[in-house]
Image: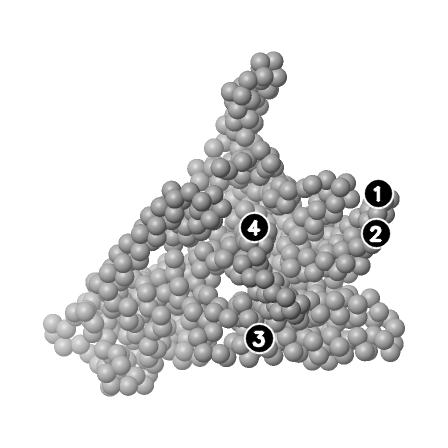
Amino acid sequence: MLRWAPYPIVRVTLSFILGVLLYLLIGRQEGIGPGLLAFFFALFILAAILAKKYRTAFAYDVAGILALLTFAILGFVITQQRTEIYQPNHLAHLSAAPAFYIGVVDDYVLQKPGYQSTVLEVTQVQVNGAWQKASGKVQLSVPHDSEAKYELKYGDVLLVKGAPQEVTPPLNPNQFDYRNYLANKGIHYRHYLQSFQYQKLGHEPNNLILSYSIQLRRNLDEVLRERIGEKREYMIASALILGVKDELDNSIRQAYADTGTMHVLAVSGLHVGLIYTLLMVVLARMNSTARQRWLGAILVLAVLWLYAFITGLSPSVLRAVLMFSLVTIGLALRRRTVIYNTVAFAAGALLFYNPYNLLEVGFQLSFLAVLGIVYLQPRLYKLLEVDNWLLDFVWAYFTVSVAAQLATLPLGLYYFHQFPMYFWLANIVVVPLATLVLYSGVVALLFSWVPVVSNWLFDLHLVLTYLMNDFNLWVQRWPQALVNGIDITLLQAVLLYALLLAFILFLAIKKLRYLSIAVGLVAILVVQEITEAQRQQRQKQLVVYSVRGSTGVGLVQGQQAVLLADSALRHNKSNYTFNVQPHLWQLGVQQANIVSFVDAAPGTAPLVTLPDSNQLLVWQGKRWLILSRPPKLHPKAGFEVDYLLLRQNIRVWPEQLQAYKAGKVILDASNATWYRKRLHQQLDTLGISYFDVADSGAFVVEF
């Protein structure tokens, strides 16, 4: 039987989360939150007084239920208050587009090739010639072509010319929703600036502590850059120790993602846990008196928060530092703390500060991994007794890795659509190496001012980083190292967690009803997969994808697909991965057969190159004329096409297009903005129906 009594903080946090989810599901309900909160709080006070008077189990249960409902309404109200877009002076409610606006840089400045990106907290706008107060966040991108390391820094006050643009929704089916991602951070606008469009007015950081923290992290990053000779190892060291991933190469990211060790490159709970473990070992003897315990606790807290400070006070580190700080205080008090309450308190505190943390992938995965390690790892570890200390160490790391992977598996499949097959082996080797890399790097930074010692320490750090990276690259090349293309819905992810929970309850409580529930959930998932596979076998689609500066036309039949692509798309893997691949995975297509528009081999695609170098595509009874060069062939009488695709800023008069009697003209994203806007006006004047994939998203035809 489940006992809730030892877990009061867990109950409170779950109730608060329920309120947050309720607000996110039903949307804006202005005015009802505070009233409901006052009502339920008054009911709880009344029920608590009656329970204290009558001292019956029923009275205590009613008071407890009302308390949890009060916390749920509190979650609703806090989320409502933290949703900035509904404030009257937000950018979304301006009467007209601003000509200028003033704001403060309120986030880390990310360095990218040729530009830098950050977030501006808007304070004032100029509308119709008058300045007024305003609120809202704008994601800024500014060119970076000077010798200065950073064009901007946290706390800079900027005057910006022009109006920010709303973040556009995803333009292709099943594409990553960057607009929703930014909205969860309170960012609804973007602005790509030229150097003449902004001017620095001063420096007034919103948070002085964060400002000093970011500056210290930059200084330490410069030390690593100077003292580590190899660029690849510097990038890994900076990401692992300080959390600076601006220059981290995509191939390195992919290698660590493919082996299931990406977490070592994101400063998070793992790194804080490693530092905490080392401190506990060093201070193990300081435990005999209360004074020693508190002295040790103060040292641990100081080191943990100092590490958070030098890593820029990133949210992932703050989560872990808060959790370990609570554990440290509990140990100093000699209280038997329940780890689940500690985890729940940390989660509740972070959600109270910002309820939208609940939607952060890192927040979800980190807490699930901790819960998996806390509950599953000891039980997995007990399955096998190992006498040899080295094998026991390996077995312990193996069970930690498996526990964390099991706890995060459904969400990992839902978000990343892949599963690293050798995660267990990679983590057994990489995590200990990452531990040594972290320790050696921190010590090297501490002694960077000592001439000879610092050279030895940085050399050791370089060797360890090199070994860790090369091992990952080696494992990545193993056969079947990564299973990708796994596409599950949110409902299926929830069902997988319900299945995992049912198995855990069956093993813990030994009740057959939980096994029956697990079997029922497996049956539901199997039926869903069979139904989905049958639907995919019957599907037929033609898709003109929206890929900036490129042309991509997908022909999907069953679980096979041909992608007609120009050279720009074929030679840019990231464009394919980001814009096209998620949709194909959703349709059950693992990999499309990519065919060139220009030199398609016979039989690879139903595409014919005409004498004027344009193409005619005939598929599923529909004719597509694809024009990329001025047409020199005049259609015969009665010749009609269903669709006319214009690409690469083709020079053609709209009147010429009328001769083809096309049902619809399609403008793809290889056309420039000025060209599309001009053609819009001309086509509207002639009454020709058209579809612009750069503005409206991918054009999908179902057969």
Query: Which secondary structure, mark 4?
Result: helix
Query: Which secondary structure, mark 3?
Result: helix
Rounded to the nearest whole Å, what is the CA distance between mark 2 and mark 3? Answer: 39 Å
How packed mark 1 is, by other alpha carbons closer than 10 Å (few <14, some 14-19, many 20 or more), is few
Callout 1, which amino acid? Answer: Ala
Mark 3 — residue? 472
Query: Which secondary structure, mark 2?
Result: loop
Rounded to the nearest whole Å, what is the CA distance between mark 2 and mark 1? Answer: 9 Å
Callout 3, which amino acid? Answer: Asn
194 sits left or right of 531 in the view: right
Mark 1 — residue? 290
Residue 286 image label: 2
Q: Are marks 1 and 4 in contact (CB under 8 Å)?
A: no
Q: Position of residue 237 (x, y in %)?
A: 69, 70
Rounded to the nearest whole Å, what is the CA distance between mark 4 and mark 2? Answer: 28 Å
Q: Position of residue 65 (x, y in %)?
A: 52, 27
Mark 4 — residue? 375
Callout 4, which amino acid? Answer: Tyr
Residue located at (55% from left, 71% from top): 425
Rounded to the nearest whole Å, what is the CA distance between mark 1 and mark 4? Answer: 30 Å
**Pointer 3 or 4: first along the chain:** 4
How packed mark 2 is, by other alpha carbons closer than 10 Å (few <14, some 14-19, many 20 or more), is some
- Judging depth in this view, the residue of 447 and 53 nearest the camera is 53
Can you tell which of label 3 and label 1 is closer to the viewer?
Answer: 1
